[in-house]
């Protein structure tokens, strides 16, 4: 049975939504959870039924969002440090945290370690798409300054994740650029293009709009560009819903139409763009599994992050990445 270490203290809203998410995940899937944090607080929110069914590891320190990510290596009594150590020591298969993302990435990279042929890990996230499957984008913040070799590895990791975890038989991988033509892009993307064109799954350069129109399954970019893309997309989605509400308040016919569409249209649309539906972002390229959630994660987000960690751990993605990198090195 898969064992998941959960940082019970890292989120913006305390341990309660994290614990609720663990309980919800247990109702859907069989796994062994290990909650890491202040035991007294965890037991306060954990239903009595689970008190003797869930292991708790005491951690008296919490790394907050205002702390430096480099301090995480020194604070060995923090909840995220101890949770990551469980994966490093092979006690747990994966770690899930909604805490300080920089600290989690630092600890996962340096304590769990990278896969042998990976120079730097990448943070991946799912974006809404008009296609049946969502679009995987990486990197969205782990590596701000990238070399072509990094993007090359990101492409391979993304293709393998789409195939092994998302269940896409023949993923289409594109390189984010300022135009679809082979000649477009900056020096970084042009060099990367030359390295990737030998793969039959590489479809060439793609533009930002292609992330959402179903033309590509995996989009590769540097972490600086990817993080701006992610935050911009979240802001646009939020603005659209706000504008829709404002216009509906001004028009009675619009309000009546909205009532008719509320369940079938708006509910499905909100589900499609709700980041809580994805749970968290996997850190690809480490010798294990780390799912990094947003600080404001609710119970649904934690549940989905755990389910994502289980799917990742049950796949052979890491061995597949290593096999292809070894073959093409």
Image (cartoon, helix red, strand yellow):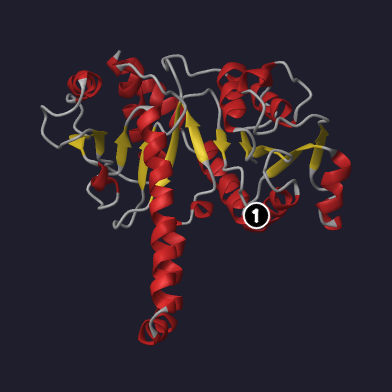
**Which residue occupies 14% across, 37% down?**
180
Q: Is residue 106 visible?
A: yes
Against 106, is 12 above or below? Answer: below
> From the viewer's perspective, is 245 left or right of 183?
right
Q: Residue 312, how many percent across, how many down?
A: 51, 39
Q: Quadrant of the N terminus?
A: top right
Give the side of residue 192 with respect to residue 57, left or right: left
Q: Residue at x 22, y 40 (%)?
A: 207
Which quadrant of the figure has residue 24?
bottom right
Residue 83 in picture, x, y percent from top left: 70, 30
Q: Secondary structure at mark 1?
A: helix
- The residue most toward the front is 250
* Outermost right residue: 40
- Along the line of sight, which residue is nearer the eye, 98 or 65? 65
Task: Classify 122 as above or below 245.
Answer: above
Neighbor class of circle 1 (other Cα within 10 Å; few <14, some 14-19, many 20+) is many
Give the image quarter of residue 109: top right
Specify whether 66 is left or right of 124.
Answer: right
The residue sitting at 51% across, 18% down in the picture is 114
Q: Dividing the image into 4 quarters, which one contains the C terminus?
A: top left
**Is residue 21 left or right of 203 when viewed as pictured?**
right
Would residue 166 be seen by someone viewing this image from the given angle? no
In this picture, is 92 found above or below 195? below
> Residue tagged by mark 1?
299
On the image, the x and y values in percent for residue 77 come to 79, 24
Q: What residue is shown at x 51% (from left), y 24% (from top)?
A: 286
Question: Foreground residue, 149 or 208?
Answer: 208
């Amino acid at each position: 049975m898969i064992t998941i270490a959960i940082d019970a203290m890292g989120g913006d809203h305390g341990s309660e939504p994290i614990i609720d998410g663990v309980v919800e995940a247990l109702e859907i899937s069989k796994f062994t959870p290990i909650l890491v944090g202040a035991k007294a607080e965890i037991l306060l929110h954990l239903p009595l039924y689970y008190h003797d069914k869930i292991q708790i590891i005491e951690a008296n320190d919490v790394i907050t969002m205002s702390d430096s990510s480099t301090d995480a290596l020194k604070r060995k009594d923090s909840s995220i440090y101890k949770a990551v150590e469980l994966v490093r020591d092979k006690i747990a298969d994966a770690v899930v945290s909604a805490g300080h993302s920089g600290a989690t990435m630092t600890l996962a990279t340096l304590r769990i370690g990278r896969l042998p042929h990976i120079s730097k890990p990448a943070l991946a996230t799912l974006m809404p798409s008009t296609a049946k499957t969502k679009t995987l984008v990486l990197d969205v913040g782990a590596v701000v300054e990238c070399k072509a070799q990094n993007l090359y590895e990101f492409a391979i990791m993304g293709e393998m994740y789409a195939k092994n975890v998302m269940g896409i038989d023949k993923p289409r991988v594109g390189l984010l650029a300022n135009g679809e033509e082979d000649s477009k892009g900056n020096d970084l993307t042009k060099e990367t293009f030359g390295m990737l064109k030998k793969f039959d799954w590489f479809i060439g350069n793609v533009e930002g709009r292609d992330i959402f129109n179903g033309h590509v399954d995996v989009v590769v970019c540097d972490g600086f560009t990817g993080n701006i893309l992610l935050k911009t997309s979240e802001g646009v989605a939020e603005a659209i819903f706000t504008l829709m509400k404002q216009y509906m308040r001004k028009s009675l016919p619009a309000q009546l139409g909205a009532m008719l569409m509320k369940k079938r249209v708006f509910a499905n649309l909100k589900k499609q763009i709700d980041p809580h539906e994805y749970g968290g972002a996997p850190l690809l390229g480490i010798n294990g599994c780390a799912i990094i959630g947003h600080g404001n994660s609710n119970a649904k987000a934690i549940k989905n992050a755990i389910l994502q960690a289980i799917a990742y751990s049950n796949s052979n993605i890491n061995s597949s990445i290593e096999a292809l990198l070894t073959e093409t090195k």
